[in-house]
Amino acid sequence: MPHTVLLAEPRGFCAGVVRAINVLDQVLDGSTEPVYAFHEIVHNRYVVDDFRQRGAIFVEQVSEVPAGARIVFSAHGIAPSVVQEARDRGLRIIDATCPLVTKVHLETKKAARDGFDVLLVGHEGHDEVEGTKGEAPDRTRVVDTPGDVQALAEGNRPIFVVTQTTLSVDDTAATIDAIRARYPQAEVRNDICYATTNRQAAVKVIAERADLVIVIGSQNSSNSVRLREVAAATGTPAYRVDGIEEIDPAWYEGVGIVGLTAGASVPDTLLAPIIADLRTRGVTRVEPVIVAEETVEFRMPEEIDASQG
Ligand code: SF4
């Protein structure tokens, strides 16, 4: 029977997600007309469903948005071609891109302008990777694993390396090692953000003490998926769930200590029912395991004020 819960700290919302949610929240509150959001504002089913119920209309293509309407870009960033398409349709843009993703866009754009070929370490197809690649589509190649690095065709330009913000710290180190081995002169920026780094460090610590780790987060949330992988890499069984309804009580059999964490797009409210349920199963101790303190806050985008009314 489980007797103890280890709560990873930090866990859950990061500063970029808080900002994106506040942006859409304020735009919806101040609007008497439909509000469109390009892609999921953050990768969490509960957050997106809640906004949908409040009237936000999520779209995958700018062409789905009526000319002149208001559109909010998600925290994951957006390719310049999409921004241009939105402008061409006369859409009123509110950009909730996390400033740490914007930084990677600027690095990529500058590197291409300065004559580099860009290697973007990340997962092909992820919203953030598509947005970053869009800054220099002809100069950017996406690599995920050391094997991808070996398979790259030779080029004759110097190499500049950027990364997706939500990767596994350990896996990315291996890929960057492979890049440095093949391109010793490469200029490398490791852009994994503070929130990803801290959440992975915290889940590693709880996984080493726990008999089971549960990570709350959606399947399309890169950082949540990575948290489960980091926990599992310690040898402790680890599951990722969207919420309590996906937990199989059989997982608790023979388990004394349960580690609990949540991805950067996950509201902390989703933890409470899981902890309450564990208490009914015998848990008497809930212990926060603090690995880092976070004080990062981002200013709201300037368009927010202009968008009201
Ligand atoms: Fe920004 Fe990092 Fe949060 Fe992504 S995970 S929104 S990069 S702070």
Image (cartoon, grey):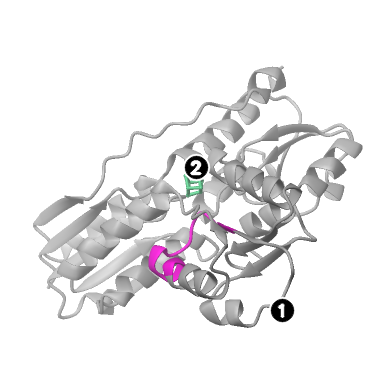
Chain part drawn in magenta: 161-173
- Determine which of the numbered discs, if any, sits on residue 17 in the image: 2
Q: Nearer the viewer, mark 1 or mark 2?
A: 1
Inspect the magenta stretch and tell me whether residue 170 lies in it: yes
Mark found first going from the N terminus, 1 or 2: 2
Residue linked to disc 1: 153
Q: Secondary structure at mark 1?
A: loop
Q: Look at 30% across and 54% down and name the residue there.
A: 273
Kind of residue indicated by mark 2: Val
Q: Look at 70% across and 18% down and name the residue there.
A: 306
Q: Nearer the viewer, residue 206 or 66?
A: 206
**Looking at the image, residue 187 lies above or below residue 142:** above
Q: Is residue 203 left or right of residue 296?
A: left
Q: Position of residue 79 (x, y in %)?
A: 74, 49
Q: Nearer the viewer, residue 156 or 96?
A: 156
Q: Position of residue 289 (x, y in %)?
A: 18, 52
Answer yes or no: is residue 75 visible.
Answer: no
Q: Residues within 10 Å of mark 1 (few under 14, many from 20)?
A: few
